Image: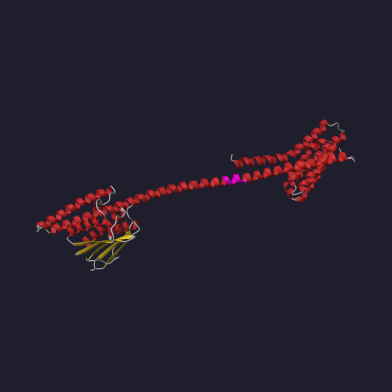
Amino acid sequence: MTSSDALDTAEVRLATGLAVVPYVLLAVSAGLALLTGDLQSEHRVGILGLSALAAGWMLWMVTLHPDRMANGKAAGLHIAVLVAFVAALGLLSPWFSGFFAFTGYVHSWHLLRGRWRIVGVAATAVAAVTGYSGGLPGPDPAVISSYVLFIVAIVVLVVLFSTFGDVTADRSVRRKKMVDQLAETNAKLEETMRENAGLQAQLLLQAREAGATDERQRMAREIHDTLAQGLAGIITQVQAASRAKDDPAAWQRHLDNAARLARDSLAEARRSVHAVGPAELESARLPEALAEVAKRWEDIHGVRTEFATTGTARPLHPEVEVTLLRVAQEALTNVGKHAGAARVGVTVSYMDDVVTLDVRDDGAGFVPGAHSGGFGMTSMRQRVTRLAGSLEVESEPGAGTAVSATVPAQELR
């Protein structure tokens, strides 16, 4: 059982007690009057008759029709009749002034409003003291003073205890409201925690899926940038060797190039599987690695390749350097497969906030947008976009091609 349920149960029990107590007090008063008093038969009949009438009056006005007490006039009428019963029964037996009179105090305080409550309590006190005294006081000032003093004392005590009861009831109401609010807050908190747990599980699942997707994309890019480029170069060299079979020196050179490409591709594939950076960047920075890539490509394809660096070269974040190196390798591979160029230029430019890689050739060119460019172009864009960079390709049939990759110059820390 919660604290709120406990308070509700206590309030129900208190309300039930207040509803039953008047009848209990009336019965106790009547019983004591009949058992302890030396009463004549007509007095006994009067006590029983008035007690029955008082019980019927309370049953009809309060117990069976409690809504009537919301009307001030009806409540006032009920208290007036109840005071009359207290006075009449008190004159027959003082036990009613001692016990049943409490019903008048309670009903006056709870059914009347404002200062009328004090009026009802005072009237009940007058009736009780009058009945207990056997009638109104005589002309003796001492008797009158005692009479009035008793009435005032009773009124003061009833008002004090009733006020204390009201304060206690008000605190109980506020406590119940606070308990209900706490219960509601706890329920909302538990619901939020359940929602957060579900959201956390969903986020973990999405993170795992995103990690798996990112790893698949990384492997696809690495395989393309190592094995696919290497195999394409090997095929080119083998085809060139078959065309140069009448020239033993050229034939041997092409076979040596194919073997070197195979060894390099195998080494790069192993490094990619272990998520290790390119061998070119292992012992050199980006400008030196790009110069090495350009020189090797020139030796294999026999196409004049020029490399240049502008701006002040500085160490960059490894992912930035790997991205630009892979873009250069892919761009040079495309030149070797499609351009038929006689001259190629590779330039890396260091600026304040960005670093740019340009690969230009004077080959056949193409119409931009005429074809998707295959996975190589997609791989370059994915790499550059992951670093919040941009990739631009400019080409025209017969006027060559220019590939430009720009990424933030995130320095090595």
Is-magenta flag for residue 178?
yes
How far from the left and from the top, in percent, is residue 212? 35, 49
The residue lying toward the viewer, choosing from 74 and 401, is 401
The residue lying toward the viewer, choosing from 56 and 281, is 281
User: Outermost residue, front direction?
Assistant: 312
Please state if 391 lies on the left or on the right of 105 as rendered.
Answer: left
Is-magenta flag for residue 322?
no
Kindly identify the residue that appears in the image at 74 percent across and 46 percent down.
Answer: 111
The residue lying toward the viewer, choosing from 291 and 268, is 291
Quadrant the N terminus occupies: top right
How far from the left and from the top, in percent, is residue 2? 59, 40
Kindly identify the residue that appears in the image at 15 percent across and 58 percent down.
Answer: 240
What kind of colouring is applied to the model shown? secondary structure
* 43 relative to 219, above or below: above
* 181 relative to 384, above or below: above
The answer to whether residue 88 is seen in the rendering is: no
How far from the left and from the top, in percent, is residue 173? 65, 45
Does the magenta stretch mainly form a helix, a strand or a loop? helix
Q: How many marks?
A: 0
- Choose top left, top right, bottom left or bottom right for residue 152: top right
The answer to whether residue 44 is seen in the rendering is: yes
User: Outermost residue, right direction?
Assistant: 139
Kindly identify the residue that appears in the image at 17 percent across and 52 percent down.
Answer: 259
How far from the left and from the top, in percent, is residue 405? 30, 61
* 233 relative to 342, above or below: above
**Magenta-highlighted residues:** 177-182
- Choose top left, top right, bottom left or bottom right for residue 92: top right
The residue lying toward the viewer, choosing from 245 and 114, is 114
